Image: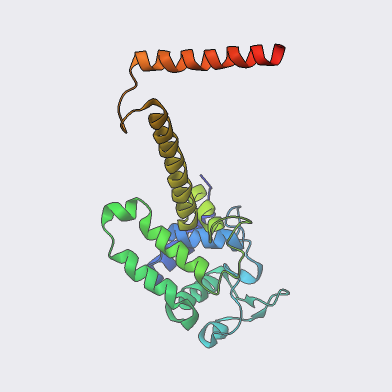
Amino acid sequence: MTTINAQVLQLAQQDAQATGLDEDVILAQWMAEEPITGKTVEWPGNNPAGISPGDSEVDALSNGKTSGGFLSFASPSIGAKAYADMINDDPNYSGIRAAIQKADTLSASQKAGGEAAELEMQAIAASPWDNGHYTASGGAQGSKLFENYASLTDTPIVPIGQKIESGVGNAVKTATVNATESAIDGMLGLQPGEAIPWTRILVVVGGVVLILILLYRTVTK
């Protein structure tokens, strides 16, 4: 399990209370953007999640821009407040707010099973915040967030895209097995699901052996 910087953890807890997001979902996103371990907070410009200019209220909290063009803040706590304000008020992240509301309706057991976190990470990955960098090459949408969440909580959650692929793959395997079994039943004159009598097995084996003998004699003539 990943060990989090104490101040980063405290800021994530504060933002979780301010936004309703799962604390570990916040950390998973921050982890995808900037370092969250170590003895000190190492966010360039005290910006926890690559917050860009464009939201007037958030822009007002900044004290300039980093060399990469992201907003810079006077302290990590102000940067964390800017993150919470983006989640709560920016029109671009209404999908995240909707996911938070839906997650609140889940039962305690569903939340414990990671369903709330899954909804929230899917929403973050689908938002303009992502810009593609929360998804590993060839992975399901938001796969990096899910990997980070698993490292933080020891609770792996499979992204919906991988669930669908897995489900389709299992369905194909099942259909293939069923078709093979049906073909064998037809060859042996059995009804579906009927057990194969030993006598019929001996007849089939004997027939195969006879065919092989005849082929051998034909080839060696």
Quadrant in which the C terminus appears: top right
The foreground one among 45 and 89 is 89
Residue at point 42%, 15% (across, down): 203
**Picture coordinates of residue 50, whole percent (x, y):** 61, 70
What residue do we see at 33% from left, 68% from top? Answer: 102
Q: Is residue 13 above or below residue 188?
A: below
* Whether residue 97 is situated above or below residue 34 in the rendered picture: below
- Taking the view exactly as shown, the residue that stands out farthest to the bottom is 56
Q: Position of residue 81 (x, y in %)?
A: 49, 74
The foreground one among 37 and 213 is: 213
Q: Look at the image and tell me whether residue 18 can be seen.
A: no
Residue drawn at point x = 41 percent, y = 59 percent: 117
In the picture shown, does residue 145 fall above or below 125? above
Res 213 quadrant in image = top right
Across and down, in percent, residue 127 comes to 51, 72
In the displayed image of the protein, which residue is found farthest to the right? 67
Nearest the viewer among 11 and 107 is 107
Q: How many marks?
A: 0
* Colour basis: rainbow
Residue 200, position as x, y percentages in the image = 37, 17
| Image quadrant assignment for residue 201 | top left
In the rendered image, is residue 81 in sight? yes
